[in-house]
C-alpha cells in the first residue's frame, strides 16, 4: 500500500494550535505527487557476530533477533512539454541524498531516462543478480561482483523500446581511482522476450580497477524461473570469474528458491542457499533461508516476517 500526497494537497504538521510546518505542492496543472512507501522485517538470525573483549575483536556465530524499519520518499512531476522528472530516497539516507551520494534524481521522456545519484552501473542495471534467499539476505552471496560506482553522484542513462533496453553509465570523479569525469564508464543491453530474457554488461573502471563484463539469461517455464549470471573481471587483484544460477518455484502463495554461486580468484569459493517465502497478503510474507558458504565458518540461517508498505 502507498499513501500519496496529490498536487492539490497541503500537508500541515501541528503542535497544539501552532503549525510547525506547512508543505504545499505547487499546482502547475500537471500530475505531481510525493509517495511514502516503506519496508520492515522482524525475526531471528544465526550468523557471524563481531565480539570485542579486552580490546580484541573476533568473530563468533550466535543466534539473535533482527528487526528493521525503513521509509522511502518518491516524488514525480511533469513539465509543460511532457518531460517527466522525480526523485527517490530512503529516510535513513536523507543526508546522503542531499549531496548526491544517496538516492537518485531523474528526468524521462519517451522511453529515455537519465538518473543521477547513487545509481547502478549500466552492467548491473542490465544483467542484475540471480535470486537470493532469507529475511536479511544472509551475506548476499547470490549477488554478482560488479565494479560499482566508486565516485558519486554517478549518472545512468537508459532507453527501453519494445523488448530491447540499452544502458550507459558514467562514474563521478572521486580523486582516488580516477580524477576526471568519464574516466570510468559502463555499458549494458538487455532483451526481454517475455518468457526468455538475455542481457550483457561491461564496466571499465580505469587502469587501477580494470574491466568487468557479464552476461545473464532468464527462462520462465510455467511456475519455474531459471536465471544464470556469469562474469569475468581483469582487476588489480588479478583475474576473477563468477558464475551463479538460481531456481524459483512458485506453488500458490509459496515460493521456493535455491541458488549456487562459484567464484574463482586464486582459489575457488562456493556458496549455496535455500529459501522459502509464503505470501500472507497485504504486503506481509513469512520468509526463511539457509546459506552454506566457503566464506563462512558455519551454516547461517534466518527466519521471520517481511513487510512492504
Image (cartoon, helix red, strand yellow):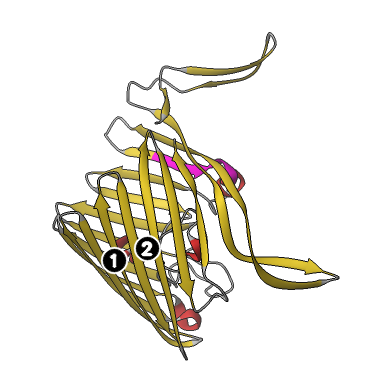
81 with respect to 15 (left or right): left
Quarter occupied by residue 262? bottom left
**Residue 64 drawn above or below residue 206:** above
Tell which of 4 and 22 is nearer to you.
4
Q: Report the residue that reaches farthest toward the bottom.
A: 266
Disc sitting over residue 169 in the figure = 2
Instruction: Give SS at disc 2.
Output: strand
Q: Residue at x 32, y 38 (%)?
A: 84
Expressed as whole percent of the image width and height from the top left, the position of residue 223 reads 19, 54
Q: Please identify the dominant SS of the magenta region.
A: strand
Q: Earlier in the sequence, mark 2 or mark 1?
A: 2
Residue 96 showing in the rendered view? yes
Question: Which quadrant is home to the C terminus?
Answer: top left
Q: Is residue 87 magenta?
A: yes
Horizontal and vertical percent position of residue 94: 58, 43
Residue 166 forms part of the magenta stretch:
no
Left or right of 21: which side holds 145?
Answer: left
Q: Position of residue 204 (x, y in %)?
A: 39, 76
Label 2–label 1 contact, CB within 8 A: yes
Tell which of 151 and 283 is nearer to you: 283
Q: Which residue sits furthest right?
A: 54
Residue 246, image quadrant: bottom left
Amino acid at each position: 500500500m502507498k499513501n500519496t500526497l496529490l498536487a492539490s494537497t497541503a500537508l500541515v504538521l501541528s503542535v497544539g494550535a501552532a503549525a510547525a510546518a506547512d508543505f504545499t505542492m505547487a499546482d502547475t496543472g500537471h500530475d505531481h505527487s510525493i509517495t511514502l512507501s516503506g519496508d520492515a522485517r522482524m525475526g531471528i538470525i544465526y550468523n557471524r557476530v563481531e565480539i570485542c573483549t579486552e580490546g580484541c575483536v573476533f568473530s563468533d556465530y550466535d543466534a539473535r533477533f533482527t528487526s528493521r524499519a525503513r521509509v522511502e520518499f518518491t516524488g514525480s512531476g511533469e513539465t509543460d512539454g511532457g518531460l517527466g522528472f522525480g526523485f527517490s530516497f530512503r529516510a535513513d539516507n536523507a543526508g546522503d541524498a542531499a549531496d548526491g551520494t544517496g538516492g537518485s534524481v531523474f528526468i524521462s521522456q519517451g522511453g529515455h531516462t537519465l538518473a543521477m545519484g547513487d545509481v547502478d552501473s549500466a552492467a548491473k542495471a542490465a544483467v542484475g543478480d540471480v535470486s537470493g534467499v532469507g529475511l536479511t539476505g544472509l551475506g548476499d552471496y547470490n549477488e554478482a561482483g560488479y565494479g560499482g560506482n566508486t565516485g558519486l553522484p554517478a549518472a545512468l542513462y537508459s532507453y527501453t523500446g519494445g523488448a530491447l533496453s540499452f544502458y550507459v553509465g558514467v562514474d563521478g570523479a572521486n580523486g582516488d581511482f580516477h580524477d576526471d569525469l568519464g574516466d570510468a564508464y559502463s555499458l549494458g543491453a538487455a532483451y526481454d522476450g517475455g518468457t526468455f530474457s538475455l542481457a550483457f554488461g561491461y564496466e571499465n573502471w580505469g587502469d587501477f580497477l580494470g574491466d568487468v563484463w557479464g552476461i545473464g539469461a532468464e527462462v520462465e517455464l510455467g511456475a519455474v524461473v531459471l536465471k544464470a549470471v556469469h562474469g569475468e573481471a581483469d582487476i588489480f587483484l588479478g583475474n576473477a570469474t563468477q558464475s551463479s544460477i538460481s531456481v524459483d518455484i512458485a506453488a500458490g502463495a509459496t515460493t521456493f528458491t535455491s541458488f549456487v554461486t562459484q567464484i574463482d580468484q586464486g582459489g575457488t569459493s562456493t556458496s549455496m542457499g535455500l529459501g522459502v517465502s509464503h505470501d500472507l497478503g497485504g504486503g506481509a510474507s513469512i520468509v526463511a533461508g539457509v546459506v552454506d558458504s566457503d566464506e563462512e565458518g558455519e551454516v547461517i540461517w534466518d527466519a521471520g516476517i517481511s513487510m512492504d508498505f
